[in-house]
Amino acid sequence: MKTTTIFSTLLIQVHLVCYVWSVLPPPGHVTMDSVNMKHVLKWRPPPTPCSTPFLYSVQFQGEFEVTVLDGIWVDSLECQDMTRTHCDQTLDLGSDSDYNIRVRARCASQTSEWAQLSPPFNRRDTLLMVPQMTVSAVGDALLVSFEQALLTASIVVEVWKHGNAPGQARVFTVPAAERLLHVADLQDRSLYCVRARVLMKVQLLSQDTQEQCVRVAGPHAPWKSPTTAVLTLLLMVGVAFSAVWCVVQCRTRRAYCRNFQKEPLPHSLLHDGTATIMPDELKEEVCVDVRVVSKDQRLLPGHNAHV
C-alpha cells in the first residue's frame, strides 16, 4: 500500500513537470524606449525553442480605458501577430496619463501569458534630445539655425555677450518648425555666446546644447571676409591686365601704321584709264621761234637755212 502511494505521488509530479514545460513562457525584459515623443515598446523572445517563428501581440490600457471603459484592454492595431520584437506605440499613447502595456507570444497552437510593462509608462517621461545648433555671424547680427528638432516643441535660445553675467542673457523662444533665429543690433567687434534647449510644455525640457561663441565684426564685415578679399584682388588684377593689353595694342598699331604707309596706285591701274597730272609731274614749257614765210620766199636763196 505504501509503495502504491509513493508511485502515485511520483506520477503526479511527472505530470506537473510535463505540464509546466508544455506551457509557453511569456516574453521577457519588457521596456519602453521613448525619445523625442516617439514611444517604442521592446521585449525579448520566450526562453524556449519554437518550431515556427514566434508571433507577438500588444495591448494597452490608459486612464480613459480604466475609468470610463471599465478597465478593458485595447489592441495595438499595428502590433498584432507580428514576428518583430518591438512595437511603435506613438499613436496609441495620445495623452499624458499613465499607460499599462502588455505583450504575449504565440508558438503554433501555444499562447503564453501576458508580460506587463512595469512601472506604467507616461509620455512625459520621454527623453528630449539636444537640438543640433549652428551659429554664424552676418554683419552686426547672428544667425542661429537648428536641425533634427521636435516639430511639436519649442526651442529656448539664450544669447549673451562674452564676459557678462548669466542673468544678462537675452532669451528667445523659437517654434521648432521655423528652425531659424535672427539676432540683430549687436555690438561691433564683440564676442557673443549662444546655447539652446528644447521645451515641451512647461515641465519637459531637454539638456542644454554646448555653448557656441562667435565674434560679430560689424556692418562692414562682409568686405573683410577672405572670400570678398580674394574676389576684390582678382578684379583688380583683371583691370590691370586689361589696361596693359590696351597699351600694348595701341603701340603695336601705331608702329604698323608707320612702317606700312599706303602708296598711290600707278596711272595704269586707275579705274578710268586716265592719269591725273599732279603738280610735280608738269613738264617744263619749251618755247621755239617760228617764222612764217610764203611759199615763194622759201625758194629764194638764203631762206633755206631758216626752214
Image: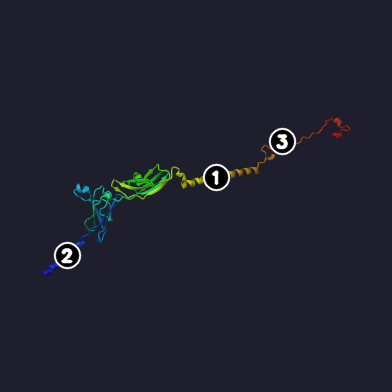
Q: Is residue 82 left or right of residue 138?
A: left
> In the rendered image, which quarter is residue 47 located in?
bottom left
Q: Earlier in the sequence, mark 1 or mark 2?
A: 2
| Number of the front mark, 3 or 2 | 2
Residue ID at (56%, 44%): 243
Question: Dot 1: what SS?
Answer: helix
Amino acid on which the number 1 mark rests in the picture = Ala
As drawn, the label of residue 292 is: none
The location of residue 141, given as percent across then percent down, is: 40, 43
Q: Is residue 276 left or right of residue 212?
A: right
> In the rendered image, which quarter is residue 51 located in?
bottom left
Circles 3, 2 touching at the beta carbon (< 8 Å): no
Q: CA distance from mark 1 to mark 2?
A: 106 Å
What is the quadrant of the N terminus in the image?
bottom left
Residue ID at (85%, 30%): 295
Q: Earlier in the sequence, mark 3 or mark 1?
A: 1
**Looking at the image, is 182 positioned above or below residue 289?**
below
User: Which residue lies most toward the left here?
Assistant: 1
Circles 1, 2 touching at the beta carbon (< 8 Å): no
Question: Dot 2: what SS?
Answer: helix
Question: Dot 3: what SS?
Answer: helix
Q: How would you rate the neighbour count of disc 1 (Cα within 10 Å): few for under 14, some for 14-19, many for 20 or more?
A: few
Which residue matches tag 3? 279
Which residue matches tag 2? 13
**Looking at the image, is 46 positioned above or below residue 131?**
below
Q: How would you rate the neighbour count of disc 3 (Cα within 10 Å): few for under 14, some for 14-19, many for 20 or more?
A: few
Amino acid on which the number 2 mark rests in the picture = Gln
Of 123 and 73, nearer the camera is 123
What is the quadrant of the C terminus in the image?
top right
